[in-house]
Image (spheres, helix red, strand yellow):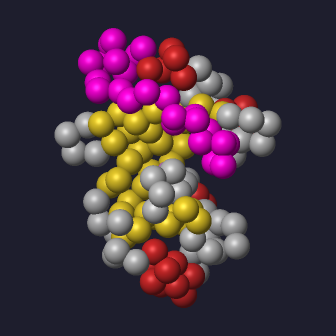
Amino acid sequence: MIGRLNHVAIAVKDLSAAIATYRDVLGADVSAPLPQPDHGVTVVFINLPNTKIELLEPLGEHSPIAKFLERNSDGGIHHICYEVDDVRAARDHLLAGGARVLGDGEPRIGAHGKPVIFLHPKDFNGTLVELEQV
Ligand code: CO
């Protein structure tokens, strides 16, 4: 069901410092920061030959990554995103198998303008999983 790894998202407290690390230390191709108020994050995309890394910094008072950064003060891997052909079919398959979909279960438009759902970390080895329809 799942296809390519679309991205790995890393939550950071200080986006400028994280950008400098990826650009200057790791020599990566780093995009300009993109504020996404609807998602409560500012995002930077790091394009690698085979996938993307997204650095997420909290934006606004109700950022969905604020609690994560309280627990992980150095930042850390927040979620991984796999591609699927049909996000609703994937959701129905997962629900039938007992997995938990976060929120009301309806796909939302994600950071790339495509429908996404998130799956409960407890059902996937402690990792928050995003499925993105491509
Ligand atoms: Co994501």
Extreme-bottom residue of the structure: 96
Q: How many marks?
A: 0
In depth, the one of 17 and 40 nearer the eye is 40
Q: Quadrant of the N terminus?
A: bottom left
Q: Is residue 128 left or right of residue 51?
A: right
Span colored in magenta: 20-43
Is residue 58 visible to the viewer in this orientation of the structure? yes
Residue 94 percent across, percent down from the top left = 51, 79
Residue 110 percent across, percent down from the top left = 53, 57
Q: Quadrant of the C terminus?
A: bottom left
Residue 33 percent across, percent down from the top left = 49, 29
Residue that appears at 37% across and 21% down = 22
Residue that appears at 33% across and 13% down = 25
Residue that appears at 44% across and 38% down = 54
Quarter location, residue 72 = top right
Q: Is residue 20 left or right of residue 70?
A: left
- The answer to whether residue 97 is above or below residue 41 is below
Let me know if residue 21 is in the magenta part. yes
